[in-house]
Structure formats: C-alpha cells, structure tokens
C-alpha cells in the first residue's frame, strides 16, 4: 500500500490483505451499503481487518464481528480521501510466495560515493547488478551490513544516509521492478509513495526505501548476486528431484524423474547465477516406455541391457571403439536420439586355427577384404567380408557364430549317437 495512493489492483490476487486502520463508534453501527467513516480520525480507535476485494469505487472488507454484523460480516468501504484520514494505507500485510534464494551483497565503487550511473556500472564491471532485495529477510541483512560498516546513526543528508539499490521505475509509472528482470517486488518497504522517480535507494538507519531522479546525487551503493537457485524438490508434482549439490550453488544440476506419467520438458537443469537453465518440466499424461532396436549398430552395447526402459531412465551406449554416449527415455523415445556408431575399428584378425581356416591366409585384414572360411569341425565353407573389425557373411553372421554353431551341432549329434549305441548294447 502507498500512503495517499489507492493502488490495490492485483494485490488481492496474491492473498487477502490484513491491515490496521482507525475506526469511530459510528463504524460499529454499520448495517449495509457503501460506507464512509467520517469520524474515524476525530474518534479514533484502532481495528484490524481484512481486504478481500474491490470495485472501482469501494473496498470489500471483512471485519471481526461475525456474520451478524454489517453486510454478513463485511463492509463496503468507499475509496475516497477519507480512507486516507483513517490511515487505511499505512499498515498492511499480504502474503507473497516467491522463490527462495540466497544473495551475496557488496558495495559499488569500492564503497565510495558515486552517482547512480557510476554505481550501476561498477556493479556490472564485477559481473553483478545493483542490489536486489527480494524479502524483508534480505532487507534486514543489508541494513545490518551497512550499519556494521558505516554506523547506525543518521548522517547530515541523503548522501550520507542513502545507498543506491536495484529498484527501478524507469518509465515513472509507479510500478517498480528489480533490475534483474526476474525477481518480483513481493513487498514494499517505502514509508510513502513518491511519483515520477526512477531509481531506488535504501536508508541505512530505518531500512526504508526511497526513490530519486537526480543524476548528480552521489551516495554509496550496493551490488548483489544470487548465490543459490531455489529448491525444486516439491515444485514438480509427481517427480523426484536429485541435486548434484544440496546447497544448489552455481553449477548444481537438478535431475527430474517422474514417478508417474511422462516427463514433459528438459530432465536436467543447471543452476546459473541464481536461475535454472530452462523451464521447469512437468509430469503427467500416459507413461511411455522406450525400446532399443540396435540403432547404434553392430559391435555396440547398451547398459543396462533389457527389453524396455521406463520414462526418465538413462542408458549408456558403448561403441566398438569404446566411445560412449548417454541417453534418457523421454515419452517413448531416447533423448538425444541414438544413432549408429561411427566405428573406428577397421582391422579384422584371422580366426583361431581350431575353429576355421581361411583363404587367403594372413594374420590381419583391412576393411572390405574378402576371405573364404572353412569350418574345422565340419567341411563347410562360406565367404566373409571384413566389416568394422569382424568377418561377416551375407546373413550378417560372424565366422565365430557360424563355425561355433556347427561345432556345437556336431557335438550334440555325436553325443546322441553314443547314447543311442549304448542303449542298443544294453538290449
């Protein structure tokens, strides 16, 4: 609330506004309709009430006398100058929930007095902004720091008492914002509203905010930078959030896995200068699993190896050249997309002599070399081509697979034959 300025639009969308004002005995007899308490200042009694709504001409206010008083427990207070006389706008509180972050504060220009422009440039040269003060907690933190460094007694004028900060209203509309273009002005610490002022300052003794237009005023100033990102643990319904650093300092990653439903958005965010690197993801919709169909090609492996992967599950692809890539199942497909390995293995080696003989016979072969292999276990011959470090036939089978299977088959046949002969002998 600003004293002598009726500006409540949007306030009640955050929460009802609890406030203290003067009332007279006339207020107690209110029974309905639009009301002005003309005697509130001369017959002043303090009373706490709750602003719950408004029109262009009235405030809808709940008193504390129960539903049998007034208009079902409410009063329709006229929005006029008399409301100022009743101190309606001096002591008010609303609940505003914003992201909780820690800030580190320092002085601009080495702690020496400077104009707004010089102070702002000094902060920017350090990779900072003029001070952002998102809550009363931070306001108290700054006042304590200033008083420890410059004393708690008031000086002779604005230059000694005021410190530049990052509250701005460059268009002079009366709607202030913080210079970082992110942090909302969730509370207002100004004793009174002054219009047509662009730049904010904080008083070192009272902690109150003021605004000035002067380009020549030299005062000390404050810089800030956020040192943590806000906690996302309960931010995304249905998700489990894992931090690489529970303190959520710069560089911390936050990984999201949906307990139910599919993840929409980026699954891993990074804390960068107090802000997360992307939009916060959501969980919902149908849970869609992913399948791996050997997209990485022959010679590659996937870990873990199984038939399907849950939404949010991560896998590692290892190529034949030992290079690896990481992927995550997101709504039915892996992200990033699994593509064929660009294998650097081009040399094939002759098979074990107990398994097969090859023509031509040499120890190593290059990509595309053709050989004829004859399995030792059985007189079976086939042609193979050296591909990505392995000999492959037209059926996409290796020499090991072909000759190994034949050897197993022959052993099985021999075993069955011996068993059959033993049975005949017994008879």
Image (cartoon, helix red, strand yellow):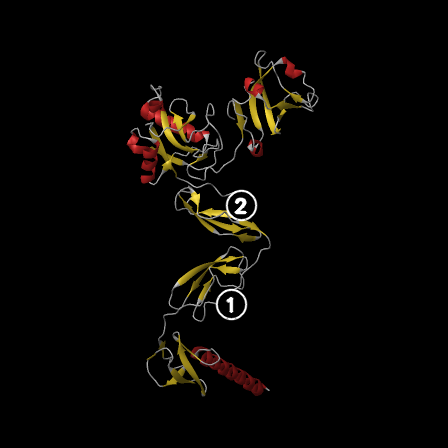
Q: CA distance from mark 2 to mark 1?
A: 32 Å
Between residues 35 and 17, which one lies in front from this camera angle? 35
- Locate residue 231, reporting x and y percent: 47, 41
**Residue indicated by mark 2:** 236
Q: Residue at x 35, y 75 (%)?
A: 347
- Locate residue 31, reporting x and y percent: 70, 19
**Residue indicated by mark 1:** 293
- Answer above or below: position of 321 versus 71: below
Between residues 45 and 345, which one lies in front from this camera angle? 45
User: What is the tally of numbered marks visible in this picture?
Assistant: 2
Q: Secondary structure at mark 2?
A: loop
Q: Which quadrant is home to the C terminus?
A: bottom right
Toward the top, the furthest residue is: 42
Q: Secondary structure at mark 1?
A: loop
Going by the image, does 395 lie left or right of 226?
Answer: right
Quarter residue 7 falls in: top right
- Answer above or below: position of 229 versus 169: below
How many neighbours does mark 2 have within 10 angstroms: few (below 14), some (14-19), or many (20 or more)? some
How many neighbours does mark 1 have within 10 angstroms: few (below 14), some (14-19), or many (20 or more)? few
Q: Nearer the viewer, mark 2 or mark 1?
A: 2
- Locate residue 321, reporting x and y percent: 37, 68
Q: Earlier in the sequence, mark 2 or mark 1?
A: 2
- Locate residue 315, reporting x and y percent: 47, 59
- Answer above or below: position of 221 versus 316: above
Q: Which mark is residue 71?
A: none
């Amino acid at each position: 609330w600003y004293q002598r300025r009726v500006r409540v639009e949007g306030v009640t969308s955050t929460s009802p506004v609890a406030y203290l004002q003067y009332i007279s005995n006339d207020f107690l007899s209110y029974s309905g309709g639009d009301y002005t308490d003309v005697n509130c200042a001369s017959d002043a009694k303090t009373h706490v009430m709750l602003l719950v709504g408004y029109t262009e001409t009235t405030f809808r206010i709940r008193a504390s006398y129960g539903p049998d008083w007034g208009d079902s427990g409410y009063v329709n207070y006229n929005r006029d100058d008399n409301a100022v006389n009743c101190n309606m706008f001096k002591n008010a509180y609303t609940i505003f929930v914003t992201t909780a972050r820690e800030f580190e504060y320092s002085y601009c220009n080495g702690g020496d007095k400077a104009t707004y422009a010089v102070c702002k440039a000094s902060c920017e040269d350090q990779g900072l902004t003029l001070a952002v003060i998102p809550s009363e907690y931070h306001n108290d933190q700054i006042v304590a720091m200033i008083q420890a460094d410059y004393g708690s007694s008031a000086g002779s004028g604005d230059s000694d008492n005021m410190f530049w900060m990052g509250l701005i209203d460059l268009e002079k509309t009366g709607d202030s914002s913080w210079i970082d273009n992110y942090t909302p002005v969730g509370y207002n610490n100004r004793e009174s509203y002054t219009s047509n002022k662009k730049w904010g300052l904080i008083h070192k003794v009272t902690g109150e905010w003021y605004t000035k237009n002067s380009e020549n005023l030299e005062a000390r100033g404050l810089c800030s930078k956020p040192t943590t990102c806000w906690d996302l643990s309960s931010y995304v319904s249905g998700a489990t959030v894992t931090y690489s650093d529970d303190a959520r300092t710069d560089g911390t990653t936050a990984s999201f896995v949906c307990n139910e439903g599919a993840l929409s958005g980026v699954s891993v965010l990074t804390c960068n200068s107090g802000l997360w690197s992307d939009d916060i993801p959501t969980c919902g919709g149908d849970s869609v699993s992913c399948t791996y169909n050997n997209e990485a090609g022959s010679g590659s492996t996937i870990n873990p190896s199984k038939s399907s992967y849950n939404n949010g599950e991560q896998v590692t692809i290892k190529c034949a050249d030992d290079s690896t890539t990481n992927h995550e199942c997101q709504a039915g497909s892996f992200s990033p997309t699994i593509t064929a390995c660009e294998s650097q293995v081009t040399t094939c080696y002759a098979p074990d002599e107990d398994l097969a003989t090859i023509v031509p016979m040499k120890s190593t072969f290059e990509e595309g070399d053709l050989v004829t292999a004859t399995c030792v276990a059985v007189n079976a011959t086939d042609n193979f081509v050296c591909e990505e470090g392995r000999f492959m036939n037209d059926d996409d089978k290796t020499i090991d697979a072909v000759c190994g299977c034949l050897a197993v088959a022959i052993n099985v046949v021999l075993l069955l034959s011996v068993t059959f002969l033993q049975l005949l002998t017994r008879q």
